[in-house]
Image: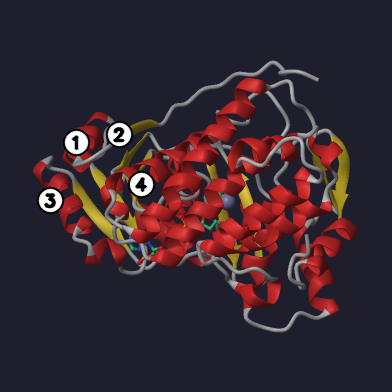
Amino acid sequence: MSYENFVYEQPTRIVFGKNSIEKLGCLALEFGAKKVLINIGGSSARKSGLLDNVITQLEKAGIEYVLHSDCTPNPRSTWIDEGAFIYTAENCNFILAIGGGSVIDASKAIALLVTNPDKDGIWHYMSGEGEFKNEAVSLAAILTLAATGSECNGSFVITNEKTKEKYVNSHNSARPVFSICDPAYTYTVNKWQTACGISDIISHVLEQYLYNDNTCDVSDGMCLGVLKAVVRWGPVALKQPDNYDARANLMWASTIGLNGILGAGHDGNWVVHMLEHALSAVFDVAHGAGLACLTPYYMSYISAEDTAGKIDRLGTELFGIDGSVKNIKDKTVKKLAEFFKSIGMPGTLQELINAPVTDDLIYELAEKALPWKLMSVGGYKPFTVRDAVKVFKSSTKPLKL
Ligand code: NZQ
Ligand code: ZN
């Protein structure tokens, strides 16, 4: 294997750095905004003063707005349906998401639903029944949490609260036209959510690194570079929430982590994400915490050969493990598990969901994680429901390495 042919295009303009918000009015005008649907989460954008600042910038530019608030983490399909209704009723022509992955994802879904209305709302599309025929309306983002990379990709993950399903969808036209990424906006993110973000970034990089080939050295080297930065600066952000360098490194890592550049031209993995989406669908846990819990168990489950020796490379380059020792793979997984623990992430499934785990629950989660029964995984044997059961089961006991 080697690099496959690919086209890499990055239509989102990233406006990064201190006080970037001052450019909001000009940017919104440049992209034709006349009346904006502003989407926000529960309270952080109001508390920090960011919402007021955004409104001031829009008013200065003569742009009208209407507010849609209280988007929850793991955004619900019903909130998207309401947002699409408001957008249309208020004759908006632009969407602005202020928040983390949840608000940005929900905004993308609204941007597509308004041009592809359906009586069953967004779930018609998330369930795989419908396909978006029309392009999304323009949306932009103001990022307040370094984690998902949603600020620079076309993906969105939506939960159906009734059926407890959580699915990913993606559309090129749903990529933000611009994203304002000021690391200072993340100073107010608490320790838990910062750690969840760090874990999500690490997982995105690993899911693009752990495939069965080692000839795509530009990609693998970039992955290791991003991981080194996150492992270095993540703990600093936890100790000093207003350390600009730490927040800036995490924010840029979030964007690079899932804007397609690390995965261009080769296979990916994404098993841990599928397993985690089942968990957050059923238990509404924080996405990053679920990933931190499951990743070491998954890495321990797969064989070293399945990743063309790249777990060993991870151990030597990221954690400085001596390359001549035996069992580098186990030592690497242990180091990673210790890192997640050191930033306050849960170590077992019970700890994550704060409840006992039965066999029935494990089978339910495994089925939910793989609705197509198996998934292909970067050049080695497909991952099946049986494999999912084994990984979930192993995660009920402390990792032994
Ligand atoms: O609701 P508010 O009050 O804003 O509080 C939020 C929320 O409670 C808070 N927060 C955000 N910015 C803050 C802040 N608190 C203080 N100061 C700030 N500056 O953080 C909490 C979590 O926010 P959320 O947006 O849910 O977190 P995250 O960015 O981790 O997003 C997670 C969602 O994104 C999906 C996940 O599945 C999950 O639904 N993902 C999206 C992806 C994509 N679009 O590419 C890929 C990811 O793998 C992921 O699946
Ligand atoms: Zn993720």
Residue contact at pointers 2 and 4, CB within 8 angstroms: no
Please tell me the numbered disc located at residue 15. 2
Q: Nearer the viewer, residue 324 or 42?
A: 324
Type of amino acid at the residue the image marks with label 1: Lys
Quadrant of residue 208 in the image? top right
Instruction: Say which residue label 1 marks.
Output: 23
Residue contact at pointers 4 and 3, CB within 8 angstroms: no
168 left or right, relative to 302: left
Q: Work out how far the residue at label 3 is from the one at label 2, CA to CA, in angstroms.
A: 19 Å
Residue 167 visible, this angle: no
Ligand 1 within 8 angstroms of badge 2 C-beta? no
Pick whichever of labels 1 and 2 is earlier in the sequence: 2
Q: Nearer the viewer, residue 84 or 342?
A: 342
Ligand 1 shows up in the quarter that is: bottom left
Please tell me the numbered disc located at residue 246. 4
Q: Work out how far the residue at label 3 is from the one at label 1, CA to CA, in angstroms.
A: 12 Å
Pick whichever of labels 3 and 1 is earlier in the sequence: 1
SS at mark 3? helix
Residue contact at pointers 1 and 2, CB within 8 angstroms: yes
Q: Work out how far the residue at label 4 is from the one at label 3, CA to CA, in angstroms.
A: 29 Å
